[in-house]
Amino acid sequence: MIDSTGSAELDALRLSFEVALRSVAFSLPLAVLAAWLLTRARFPGRLLFDAFVHLPLVLPPVAVGYLLLVLFGTRGVLGGWLRDHLGIVLPFTTAGAALATAVVTFPLMVRAIRLSLENVDRGLEQAAHTLGAGALDRFVTVTLPLMLPGILAGAVTAFAAGLGEFGAVITFAANIPGVTRTLPLALYTAMQSPHGDALALRLALLSLGLALAGLLASELLVRRVRVLLGR
Amino acid sequence: MLQVAASKRYEGFTLQAQFDAPTPGVTALFGRSGSGKTTLINIISGLLPADAARVQLDDQVLTDTQAGIHEPPERRHIGYVFQEPRLFPHLTVSGNLNYGARRARQRPRVVAADEVIALLALAPLLQRRPHQLSGGERQRVSLGRALLAQPRLLLLDEPFASLDAARREELLPYLVALRDRVSIPMVYVSHQFDEVLRLATHVVLLEAGRVLAHGPINEMSLRAELQSIVGPEHVGAVVDGVVTRLDEADGTAELAVGTGTLQISLRAVPVGTRVRLQLLARDIILAVQPVQGLSVRNALASTVLAVDADGYGGILVRLDVGGATVLARITQAARRALHLRPGDAVWTLVKAASTRGHTYPLAPRS
């Protein structure tokens, strides 16, 4: 399984990217919606919803993975329906790994976006209102652009964190080479195998580099957007 | 005509106001901070729901809580210039100006983009971002943005509040030019009477959420209610006149007011200009006999209309001066000494120098 040609690293790296990217793409619109609901909407059970959104932050990732398995397993409540009606199978697939990653990184993303939404000057939305912009128009042309730093920060942070999600992925999607064996899973596997030390070190360094690059990119991006927004 | 009747209750504050404002025209909502001015225009704009309200602009009912009518702000086409410029930071000046303009394409045009840009001198700013502008420039852009949305009515909420005195002086002429060149009715919130004097044709006097009086500015300047807002020191009749002679060397002008002539301090205003000035009651001197050897430039034959205690320990005398009404504030001792009674003939003495800073050009009568 493990060879020293470097293809294990490349596979894991490519998979990690794919999983993190799909997870961000999937959760970003939902995170914006959740942030909006938590900041602007008044509805019964808001507090409970708030807690629910932040649950993955405090729940052991393995528990998240297990609960996902219960829900989305082919015999699960949602999993059966998805397979029968849409032909979607999530456990033990790359898409499943992305879902598990999305759930775990969701609170990170929502927090960043929510913070930026709270900082949006309602006065600007009022101004847009008097200038003839309806609710959706205002959101798209004023609120969303002003939230951009937070959205970017949230997406990059979630992406960087998603590259390294371990517990939820291995529980829900297992450790299948080329399918769900992302960087941390490959690292774990290498550590478990008798001659994997060198590979483990390379994978660990790779993870370190990626994490650093991700954080730097996030900071630079946000600064750049802030300048554009004149702050 | 804009007809407004609104009530709104907050913790510790109740607004209960009703007034009419002519369209076109500039109506000032005048009162101290906390009198309910901003609440009132927020209700007119539709941004703030009232407990009970009826707002009608010309023949369109915008709000009628009884009939369940509430036109949303984006469909009212009422421009709003806020205290702070509230420019969109992610757009350039040109993007800000276009924001309302783009959404008003289907609307009847009240003002052309070129004219607004020229009037407000916005051309050099178009490519800049809001954070690269000075405070005065920002407020000019905000004004232009509201105008280019082709509003049927323009609300201005103390647009100079965030500016220092110098910037205010710089911006006021733009608003005056706007009033004279663009026929958009305006409702102007202010707590500075000199701003009202320069801009407004009508005034609504507000105190503690209630309308004390409303009507043309000249009429309102004579109302006792104004005193409670501006204080007795700043009460004075607002009169309009036409410049008939100008002495540039002296810096004085002769003004036809009613049937009389008034000499005032005035520069650089051509003969024929209509001007408005406020004759502060505290600056007016009354004489029961012709006087000589005084430096006062104006001694106008007048008739006492009324003599009333002003509620601040002084006496307010209302005078007819050749058809114009003027107020004079005198002491109780002076009243006793002169035996002033309604119908008495007196001389009203006005220092030309005391009118400086209280005189403003008006729009030519159309």
Image (spheres, coloured by chain):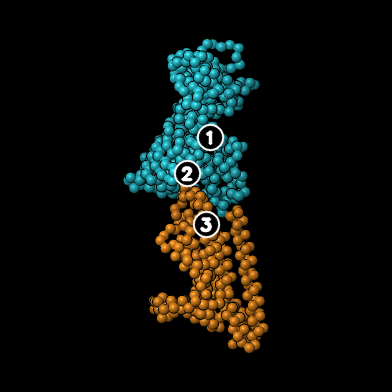
Q: Secondary structure at mark 2?
A: strand
- Host chain of mark 2: B
- Judge by depth and name the residue closer to the eye, B295 or B147: B295
Which image quadrant: the N terminus of chain B?
A: top left
Query: The chain shown in orange is which?
Result: A
**Number of other residues with Cα within 10 Å of mark 1, as a class: few under 14, some 14 to 19, many 20 or more:** some
Q: CA distance from mark 2 to mark 3?
A: 26 Å
Query: Where is residue A71 drawn, in percent x and y?
Result: 43, 76
Query: Is label 3 in a helix, a strand or a loop?
Result: helix
Q: What residue is pinned by disc 2?
A: B79
Label 1 is placed on what type of residue? Answer: Gln
Whether residue B105 is visible, yes or no, is no
Chain drawn in cyan? B
Question: Which residue lies at the image location 66% right of the left edge and 84% below the top edge?
Answer: A197
Which residue carries the number 3 mark?
A118
A12 and A164: which one is in front? A164
Chain letter behind tag 3 = A
